[in-house]
Amino acid sequence: MDVATAYLNSILPKGEVIYMEMPPGTNNPPGTVCRLNRTLYGLKQSGRYWNITVTDAILRELAELHFRRSEFDHCMFISRVGSTVVIIVIYVDDLLLFSNN
């Protein structure tokens, strides 16, 4: 599964302040800057904050499925409920989903 706008869905932490110049073609005077609330493609931090966002979603939002982070690979999450096993693997902005059911 590919997350098309993964890096645009991550919120910057409150302590992190990033300003950027407005891109050409906007109606703002040259040299105008804006403060970012979310990550963008091209920021060095975007991949890290996307990983935090998706990890939090898997562990918190899917809590009823009992997902646990693998001790050996922190980008792999495993859920075992009864005889059903579900594995989610994160690779940058792609998710691999595996299940025996």
Image (tube, rainbow, N blue to C red):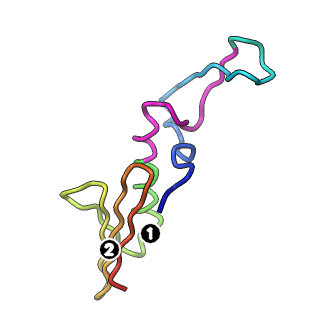
**Which residue was labeled with disc 2?**
79
Q: Does the magenta run of residues contain 90?
A: no
Tell me residue 4's x, y (percent): 55, 52
User: Could you tell whether 4 is left or right of 67 in the image?
Assistant: right
Separation (CA) of disc 1 from disc 2: 10 Å
Q: Residue at x 42, y 62 (%)?
A: 58
Q: Alpha-carbon neighbours of circle 1 within 10 Å: few (<14), some, or many (≥20)? A: few
Amino acid type indicated by mark 1? Leu
85 or 69: nearer the eye?
Answer: 85
96 or 17: nearer the eye?
Answer: 96
Q: Does the magenta run of residues contain 40?
A: yes
User: Could you tell whether 27 is left or right of 73 in the image?
Assistant: right
Query: Which structural element holds mark 2?
Result: strand
Query: Which structural element holds mark 1?
Result: loop
Residue stretch in magenta: 32-50
How many numbered marks does the figure carry?
A: 2
Tell me residue 53's x, y (percent): 46, 50
| 56 w.r.t. 44: above or below | below
Whichever of callouts 1 and 2 sits on the residue coming sooner in the sequence is 1
Q: Residue at x 30, y 66 (%)?
A: 68
Q: Residue at x 58, y 22 (%)?
A: 19
Tag 1 near tag 2, CB within 8 Å: yes
Residue 62, label in figure: 1
